[in-house]
Amino acid sequence: MEQKTGKLKTLWQLFSNMFLISSFTFGGGFVIVNFMKRRFVDELHWIDENEMMDMVSLGQSSPGAIAVNAANLLGWRMAGFPGMLAAVLGTALPPMLILLVISTFYNAFAQNRYVAFALRGMQAGVAAIIMDVACNLLGKLFKDGSILRIGLMAAAFAATFFFGVNPAILLGIAILIGIGLTFFGKEAGPSAS
């Protein structure tokens, strides 16, 4: 009975935390991922930072929204299939409800200048949160001291920013490099196992 109560508590925590995070974050997946990290890594200590980074990587490289994919992986990790359903439902329900309300009252929202001002203000906040996520990920990368990862990151940035290379091509190259390192060699740097 205690085990069932514990599992129900975990499912409720997954659903309610993801519902709250998804309800009050604007700006897409990376913003939600930042709040997921703070809640599930820093506060609840359910997973460590490396697991969160792995979930974000898998969530980004899988089809679909990164927030839903990361919630999917977190839910599966914490409580299997029921956990996955709870986390995904908690993540997807708020945007669906918000879109339902907005579409119902679209004309009133579209012509309201205060709503337009609020949305412009949120853009600045979203940019700051995305920069926070990028700086945290970058700091972790330099802290680990992996020369290969730092070099790959710099090369991917240069290829995208200066040469306009499609990110899908870079993702494919990164996958091939990861497979090659897994099967044929070890990564250079202190984070190699």
Image (spheres, rainbow, N blue to C red):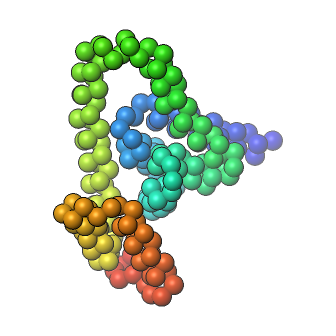
Side (left or right) of 103 relative to 160: right
Side (left or right) of 187 relative to 96: left
Quick one: which residue is furthest to the left in this view? 162
* Residue appearing at x 39%, y 62% in the figure: 168
Query: Is 136 situated above or below 126?
Result: below
User: Where residue 15 sits in the image (x, y, percent)?
Assistant: 59, 37
Residue 34 in view of the camera: no
* Residue appearing at x 27%, y 74% in the figure: 151
Query: Is 119 situated above or below 80?
Result: above
Quick one: which residue is furthest to the right in this view? 1
Side (left or right) of 28 relative to 5: left
* Residue appearing at x 46%, y 36% in the figure: 21
User: Where residue 139 sits in the image (x, y, percent)?
Assistant: 28, 61
Query: Is 94 situated above or below 47?
Result: above
Quick one: which residue is furthest to the bottom in this view? 184
Side (left or right) of 70 relative to 170: right
User: Where residue 123 sits in the image (x, y, percent)?
Assistant: 26, 34
The N terminus is located in which quarter? top right
* Residue appearing at x 63%, y 40% in the figure: 86
User: Where residue 124 sits in the image (x, y, percent)?
Assistant: 23, 35
Most foreground residue, 30 or 169: 169
Most foreground residue, 163 or 20: 163
Q: Residue 2 appears in which quarter of the rendering?
A: top right
Residue 134 in view of the camera: yes
Count the labels in the image: 0
